[in-house]
Image (tube, rainbow, N blue to C red):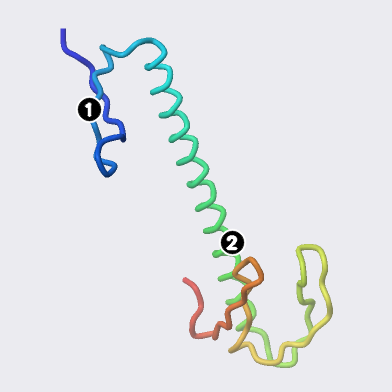
Amino acid sequence: MASSKAVGAGGAAGTPVAIELDKLSLEQLKAVKEQADAEVNLLQDSLTNIRSATARLDNASNALNDLSLRPQGKKMLVPLTASLYVPGTLDDADKVLVDVGTGYFIEVGSLCLIS
């Protein structure tokens, strides 16, 4: 009968260690399953966050492309929050501020559009 093996973390300096699953008790197998489930959930959450960030980046890119096509002096609504807009006038579409989160803004030129 061949033994089942899994690789787990726990060796020196994070080196993977082989675990013989057929020699583990039921409680130990449950712990290995729970750890694997937790790791899968963490990876799924990370993937969801990456997809969300990608969608926001695409939206920002589309907005910058649209903004660069508008004439100087164009009146528009400027978003201050997700639900609060104020009237404004486009002064220079070549230099805009982009909110990158947590109160940080980056000045982006029209030649630096995200693709």
* Image quadrant occupied by the N terminus: top left
Task: Please give the name of the residue rendered at 56% of the width and 53% of the height, measured from the top-left corner.
Answer: 52
Q: Earlier in the sequence, mark 2 or mark 1?
A: 1
Tell me how far mark 2 sits from mark 1, CA to CA.
Answer: 41 Å
Q: Amino acid at mark 2?
A: Arg
Where residue 25 sits, quadrant-wise, is top left
Q: Amino acid at mark 1?
A: Ala
Task: Please give the name of the residue rendered at 58% of the width and 79% of the height, measured from the top-left corner.
Answer: 106
Give the percent coordinates (x, y) of residue 86.
83, 77
In the image, taking residue 79 as reference, residue 100 lies left or right, namely left
Position above or below: 67 against 103:
below
Mark 1 closeness class: few <14, some 14–19, many ≥20 residues within 10 Å: some
Task: Please give the name of the residue rendered at 53% of the width and 46% of the height, measured from the top-left corner.
Answer: 48
Task: Please give the name of the residue rendered at 28% of the width and 17% of the height, measured from the top-left corner.
Answer: 21
In the image, taking residue 92 as reference, residue 86 lies left or right, namely right
Give the percent coordinates (x, y) of residue 79.
76, 72
In the image, taking residue 70 as reference, residue 8 lies left or right, namely left
Per the rendering, the mark at residue 18 is: 1
Where residue 36 sits, quadrant-wise, is top left
Per the rendering, the mark at residue 56 is: 2
